[in-house]
Amino acid sequence: MVEQYEPASDFLKAIIAEEAPLSGSPLAEENMRQLIAMTRDYDVSNRDWATMILSMEEADTPAIRQALLSAAADANEIVRAEALVGIARRDRKLALPLVLEALSSEWASMPVFEAAALVADPALVDALQRWIEPSEDEWLDQQALEALAACEQGVSTSHS
């Protein structure tokens, strides 16, 4: 049996289980502040999950943007990649140089390709070209191809 990857934090587990709201009340606003703080937690699983949850949220405040920008410079590549998605959802121009930098590294994960598809800028085409060679991970290869297609067309895959 495969062990499910979860955050160490019970607070984050409550958000995932939709038991801790992030909008619509003073309690939810406090939860959002705590979620933002968790993007700087000492535990990588907490930073990863908090950044991913924050990235998926519809809210867009200066505090959220600053948390995502800080997470984009995290020591952990997965946390950085999750932050890119949140930045790309909020501001494609701000995300562009960060995504380009991520695509220029030795390793890229699915969220990097998701962010590239959201940015959908032709300036990313050359950087994406190196990631479209077939690998042992067909699903990730498909993500890279979809990101490349979005950037070649200059059309964001965002549904907002």
Image: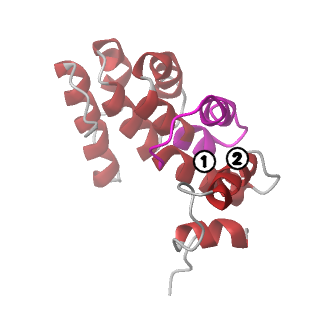
Identity of the amino acid at label 1? Thr
Q: What residue is disc 1 on? A: 51
Asked if marks 1 and 2 touch (Cβ < 8 Å), the reply is yes
- The residue positioned 29% from the left and 53% from the top of the image is 139
Identity of the amino acid at label 2? Thr
Q: Is residue 105 above or below residue 133?
A: above
Say whether residue 41 is left or right of residue 119. Answer: right
- Magenta stretch holds residue 99: no
Say whether residue 39 is left or right of residue 155. Answer: right
Label 1 CA crowd tier, 10 Å (few <14, some 14–19, many 20+): many
Mark positioned earlier in the residue sequence (1 or 2): 2
Q: Position of residue 109 (x, y in %)?
A: 47, 44
Question: Which element is circle 2 on?
Answer: loop
Pick the front one: 149 or 115: 115
Seen from this angle, which residue lies furthest left?
A: 153
Characterize the magenta stretch by its predominant secondary structure.
helix
Label 2 CA crowd tier, 10 Å (few <14, some 14–19, many 20+): many
- The residue positioned 49% from the left and 38% from the top of the image is 86
Q: Is residue 100 above or below residue 38?
A: above
- Magenta stretch holds residue 59: yes
Seen from this angle, which residue lies furthest front?
A: 25
Q: Identify the mark at residue 39; answer none if there is no mark.
A: 2
Question: Which element is circle 1 on?
Answer: helix
